[in-house]
Amino acid sequence: MNNMLNIQLSLPQFVLMIYLLIINLIVFFVYGLDKIKAPTNSRRVSERMLWFLALIGGSVGAIVSMHIFRHKTKKLSFQALLAVIILAQVWLVAWLWKLKTNVL
């Protein structure tokens, strides 16, 4: 059973994993903060910034926070661009995976 938990990561893989964890936590809290500010009409986080945060690796945090906070769930234009960002990220990962397996 212990052998199943023994995962070997290279340094770049470890750094990427930590980066993705941190950026997704940041995105989650930024979406939550924006949701809190929405009813008070105080200074909000721009949609452009929310998309940018998803683009740089925070798409999982964006999706999770949208569902938990019920934020930006009715705005189809926002969801459409977020879906494009996520599809581009999935395509990039698949392409990098294929590139890696072809090199070996």
Image: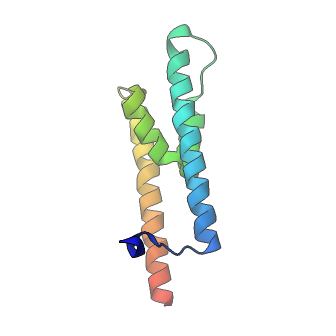
State the residue in front, 52 or 58: 58
Q: How many marks?
A: 0
Q: Is residue 99 above or below residue 58?
A: below
Colouring rule applied to residues: rainbow
Q: Is residue 48 above or below residue 102?
A: above
Could you tell me residue 95's position as x and y percent?
Answer: 45, 72
State the residue in front, 47 or 14: 14
Which residue ends up furthest to the front in the rendered image?
Answer: 2
Specify whether 44 is left or right of 88: right
Specify whether 13 is left or right of 65: right
Q: Is residue 82 above or below residue 4?
A: above
Could you tell me residue 38's position as x and y percent?
Answer: 51, 16
Q: Residue at x 55, y 51 (%)?
A: 21
Could you tell me residue 26's position as x and y percent?
Answer: 59, 39
Which residue ends up furthest to the top in the rendered image?
Answer: 40
Q: Residue at x 60, y 57 (%)?
A: 18
Could you tell me residue 54's position as x and y percent?
Answer: 53, 45
Q: Residue at x 45, y 47 (%)?
A: 60
Quarter holding the N terminus? bottom left
